[in-house]
Image (cartoon, helix red, strand yellow):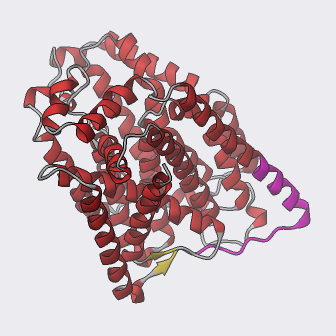
């Protein structure tokens, strides 16, 4: 059991080495270090899972083989980073001034945000102790499959043979991540699930806190943490050890990198590539990753046409798509192992009932009504809190001209349409399908929406030196 923290420390080291190799360095402040570490942990999770998957396709993975590959990868990435150190950069942070009258307020909000995060982490641990295997999806989609990979000599044949109604085409990032941890530890341990849920929750919070603290100010960063956990479903999803918190973590990483590109015109190339890299991880993590990738490309085209920079945005889209390829290729490789008629993610393209489902206006209106009702129920007090913050604090007019904010608004719009299309195509009763899915879909959106909206707020600007966009 003592090896478990070291296994995840290895993941963090891989991610940090990857960022080092791309030339990204943390500044000497808590927001930048938090953002860098949180991005690195997510990358480490993805690399660890895809390495296990690749190795398991050719031989039985052993702790020695996985450890050698991962250590070799770290050494190689560090050497690349040393060679490319001349072009390394740090995302700048403006100097923060703390007048006495405002420091007390900022500190108080900071204590509240820390209390919110600690409460969520305690809930996750307590729930995991009571239900160590998590919810139904965690059992069906990665617990059993991870056990098959870890225990069975047939490995992937055993996985596909036992899946039954558990959607054999479901991406295997979590499955292989768990199996990798067990292999490196040399034993099966349920604590792996809990630690993944805790680290994903911490990482998601760290990206939000680090991005808002870096690009905005301390007060906004702490308010972001409080708003993040305002919907109780965020903690509930993590407590059930579901995959959606990790997925939300991946998406907020992608969009934080995309926002950072607006602050680093000379380094946009690398940050756009990093955005695409995380969107590729999203595809490796869940089938919905295809929806978000399409939404991102459509948003770039739409905003580019609207703002008169279509060619520039097409180039950005090309870079993002290029960076998606490593993990997109891994997902295609996995999908090639699944019988064609078992690939559920193709259902929206070939829905049972065809065009008649799309043209059924009553069905379409029912989908809109159920999605809207489920979203309002999820957000709860956030429906009042965020508009109140934007109204009372005001919005930063010039920031609304930022390319990233406009594109992310388009991404959210097209992603909603994509999820709606999946509901149109589903063969299941709408009441069951939407009722089962809407909370989880909201979890995917919520951290990125909170980050994007708080980027617009002027709250706390009196604490910071003026920036070029104010």
In the image, what residue occupies the spot 65% across and 67% down?
30
Q: Residue furthest right?
A: 101
Q: Position of residue 20 (x, y in %)?
A: 42, 75
Q: Position of residue 167 (x, y in %)?
A: 23, 26
Residue 77 or residue 231, whichever sits in front: 77
In the image, what residue occupies the spot 8% across and 31% down?
340
Q: Position of residue 63 (x, y in %)?
A: 29, 56
Q: Which region of the structure is painted magenta?
A: 91-111
Q: Is residue 195 above or below residue 138?
A: below
Residue 39 or residue 163, whichever sits in front: 163
Q: Position of residue 40 (x, y in %)?
A: 45, 62
Q: Is residue 327 above or below residue 158?
A: below
Horizontal arrangement in the rendering, residue 177 relative to residue 322 (left or right): right
Residue 432, located in which quarter of the rendered image?
top left
In the image, what residue occupies the spot 34% across and 10% down?
362
Residue 153, located in which quarter of the rendered image?
top left
**Which quadrant of the rendered structure holds the C terminus?**
bottom right
Residue 234 or residue 318, whichever sits in front: 234
Whether residue 97 is in magenta: the answer is: yes
Residue 317 seen from this side:
no
Residue 451 seen from this side:
yes
Label count reads 0
Residue 160, located in which quarter of the rendered image?
top left
In the image, what residue occupies the spot 49% across and 41% down?
197
Horizontal arrangement in the rendering, residue 439 relative to residue 467 (left or right): left
Whether residue 264 is in magenta: the answer is: no
Horizontal arrangement in the rendering, residue 305 relative to residue 197 (left or right): left
């Amino acid at each position: 059991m003592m090896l478990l923290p070291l296994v995840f420390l290895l993941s963090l080291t891989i991610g940090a080495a990857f960022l080092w190799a791309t030339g990204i360095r943390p500044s000497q402040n808590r927001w930048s270090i938090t953002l860098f570490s949180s991005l690195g942990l997510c990358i480490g999770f993805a690399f660890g899972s895809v390495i296990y998957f690749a190795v398991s396709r050719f031989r039985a993975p052993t702790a020695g083989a996985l450890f050698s590959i991962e250590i070799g990868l770290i050494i190689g990435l560090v050497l690349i980073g040393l060679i490319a150190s001349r072009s390394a950069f740090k995302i700048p942070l403006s100097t923060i001034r703390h007048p006495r009258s405002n420091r007390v307020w900022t500190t108080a909000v900071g204590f509240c945000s820390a209390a919110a995060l600690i409460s969520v982490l305690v809930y996750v641990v307590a729930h995991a102790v009571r239900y160590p295997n998590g919810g139904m999806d965690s059992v069906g989609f990665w617990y059993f499959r991870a056990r098959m990979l870890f225990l069975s000599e047939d490995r992937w044949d055993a996985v596909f043979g036992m899946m039954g109604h558990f959607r054999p085409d479901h991406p295997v990032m979590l499955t292989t991540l768990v199996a990798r941890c067990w292999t490196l530890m040399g034993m099966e341990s349920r604590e792996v699930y809990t630690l993944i849920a805790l680290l994903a929750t911490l990482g998601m919070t760290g990206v939000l806190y680090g991005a808002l603290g870096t690009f905005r100010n301390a007060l906004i960063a702490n308010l972001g943490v409080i708003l993040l956990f305002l919907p109780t479903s965020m903690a509930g999803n993590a407590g059930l050890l579901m995959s959606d918190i990790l997925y939300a973590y991946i998406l907020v990483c992608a969009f934080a990198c995309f926002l950072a590109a607006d602050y680093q015109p000379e380094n946009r190339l690398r940050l756009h590539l990093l955005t695409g890299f995380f969107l590729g991880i999203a595809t490796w993590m869940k089938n919905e990753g295809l929806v978000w990738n399409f939404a991102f490309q459509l948003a770039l085209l739409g905003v580019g046409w609207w703002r008169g920079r279509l060619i520039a945005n097409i180039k950005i889209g090309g870079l993002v798509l290029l960076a998606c390829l490593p993990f997109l290729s891994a997902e295609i490789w996995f999908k090639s192992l699944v019988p064609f008629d078992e690939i559920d993610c193709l259902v929206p393209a070939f829905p049972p009932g065809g065009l008649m489902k799309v043209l059924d206006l009553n069905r379409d209106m029912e989908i809109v009504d159920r999605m809207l009702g489920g979203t309002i129920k999820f957000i709860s007090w956030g429906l009042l809190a965020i508009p109140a913050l934007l109204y009372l604090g005001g919005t930063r007019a010039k920031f609304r001209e930022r390319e990233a904010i406009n594109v992310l608004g388009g991404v959210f719009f097209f992603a909603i349409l994509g999820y709606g299309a999946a509901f149109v195509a589903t063969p299941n009763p709408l009441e069951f399908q939407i009722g089962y899915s809407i909370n989880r879909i909201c979890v995917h959106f919520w951290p990125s929406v909170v980050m994007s909206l708080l980027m617009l707020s002027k709250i706390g600007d009196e604490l910071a030196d003026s920036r070029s966009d104010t």
